């Protein structure tokens, strides 16, 4: 964001009355695009006679004073922050770590700092800044904010290119553990369905039939079942689409426990659970998904690297409470 001095307030005239507020403001303040005005309004940065106005379509009222309050400027590149990291391996080319649930991987609107990238910049030094892109230096793959588990990040451009190619060519050994609603059948199988943006909700992904999505294949096997209504599963990715495991399991009728995006109602499988198990599963505060295993060929040495971690405490506690 590069905005500095705020535009002067404007008072609407009778000729302005009735038009959309975002159109009026963009016309009165030509230094701001209409899309920028809309975003500022939705974030609460426009006031009408001193009161916040968030609806861009609200009709303009004659005689009212409209004022934009620009948020503070944010550095164009992420800044290092001394945040705790669980490092599993590190050398001059790469770093492997166990990301906690709740940490965003790279800065984005609404999460400009406190991310894994901020932590890596502080840990690895400013030399990381030019590796792989301004907003996401060193990042070659990602985990969702509330998914825990193993990630690798590049510290050199050579490692970034080699690891990115390995992910693109599916030469990465990845395994996850998850807890889902219902019991998938068969006990070991695959979900094969192209994934793309949900046409009804652009913030969600969905299995897209009849073209339009990207090929996605998830292999799974059941590790344990609980009361006929919950399953502990291992998943292996043959592809790496956004939200792939979450989307495939939800599409199959087995949404992950705690998933805030793809589990929108109490599942039927909850009805047959004992009360303590049902409460534990319904109250779980994030998607029950952990990246347990990550294997790859080291880009410099050619050595086979393999890392595994146990699920974090909240995941393990959930397994105990639903048993």
Image: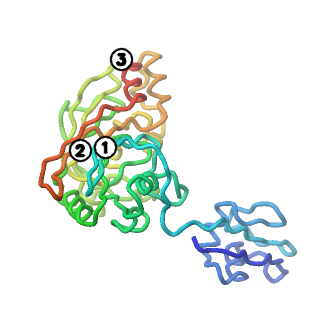
C-alpha gap between disc 3 and disc 1:
26 Å
Residue 281 rendering spot, x and y as whole percentages: 44, 27
Q: Quadrant of residue 267?
A: top left
Contact (CB < 8 A) between labels 2 and 3?
A: no
Quadrant of the rendering where the N terminus is positioned: bottom right
Q: Which residue is mark 1?
A: 150
Give the residue drawn at x 17%, y 53%.
298
Picture layout, residue 5 above or below residue 169: below
Q: Residues within 10 Å of mark 2 (few under 14, many from 20)?
A: many
Contact (CB < 8 A) between labels 2 and 1?
A: yes
The disc label shown at residue 54, or none: none
Picture layout, residue 174 above or below residue 269: below
Point out the tag, 2 or 1, that comes first from the N-terminus: 1
Quadrant of the rendering where the C terminus is positioned: top left
Picture layout, residue 81 above or below residue 221: below
Q: Quadrant of residue 292?
A: top left
Q: Which residue is mark 3?
A: 323
- Secondary element under disc 1, as helix, strand or loop, is strand
- Apparent side of residue 19 relative to residue 252 in the rendered image (left or right): right
- Apparent side of residue 61 relative to residue 213 in the rendered image (left or right): right
Residue 65 rendering spot, x and y as whole percentages: 83, 72
Residue 321 rendering spot, x and y as whole percentages: 41, 19
Q: Residues within 10 Å of mark 3 (few under 14, many from 20)?
A: few
Give the residue drawn at x 27%, y 56%.
92
Give the residue drawn at x 43%, y 64%.
135
- Secondary element under disc 3, as helix, strand or loop, is loop
- Compare residues 174 and 238 and report the one nearer the observer: 174
Label 2 or label 3, whichever lies nearer to me, is: 2
Q: Which residue is mark 2?
A: 294
Residue 21 rendering spot, x and y as whole percentages: 72, 72
């Amino acid at each position: 964001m590069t905005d500095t001095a705020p535009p002067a307030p404007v008072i609407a005239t009778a000729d302005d009355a009735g038009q959309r507020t975002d159109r009026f403001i963009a016309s009165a303040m030509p230094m701001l695009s209409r899309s920028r005005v809309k975003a500022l309004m939705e974030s609460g940065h426009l006031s009408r006679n001193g009161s916040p106005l968030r609806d861009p379509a609200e009709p303009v009222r004659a005689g009212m004073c409209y004022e934009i309050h620009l948020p503070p400027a944010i550095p164009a590149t992420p800044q290092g922050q001394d945040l705790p990291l669980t490092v599993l391996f590190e050398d001059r080319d790469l770093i492997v770590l166990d990301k906690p649930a709740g940490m965003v991987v790279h800065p984005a609107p609404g999460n400009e700092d406190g991310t894994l990238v901020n932590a890596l910049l502080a840990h690895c030094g400013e030399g990381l800044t030019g590796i792989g892109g301004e907003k996401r230096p060193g990042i070659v793959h990602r985990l969702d904010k509330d998914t825990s588990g193993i990630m690798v990040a590049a510290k050199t451009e050579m490692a970034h290119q080699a690891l990115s190619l390995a992910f693109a060519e599916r030469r990465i050994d990845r395994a996850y553990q998850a807890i889902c609603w219902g019991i998938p059948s068969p006990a070991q199988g695959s979900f094969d369905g192209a994934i793309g943006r949900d046409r009804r909700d652009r913030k969600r992904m969905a299995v897209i039939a009849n073209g339009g999505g990207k090929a996605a294949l998830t292999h799974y096997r059941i590790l344990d079942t609980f009361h006929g209504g919950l399953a502990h599963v291992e998943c292996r990715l043959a592809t790496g689409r956004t939200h792939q495991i979450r989307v495939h399991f939800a599409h199959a009728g087995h949404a992950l426990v705690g998933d805030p995006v793809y589990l929108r109602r109490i599942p039927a499988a909850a009805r047959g659970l004992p009360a303590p198990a049902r409460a534990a599963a319904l109250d779980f505060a994030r998607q029950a998904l952990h990246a347990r295993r990550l294997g790859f060929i080291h880009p410099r040495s050619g050595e086979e690297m393999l890392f595994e971690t146990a699920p974090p405490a909240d995941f393990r506690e959930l397994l105990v409470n639903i048993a």
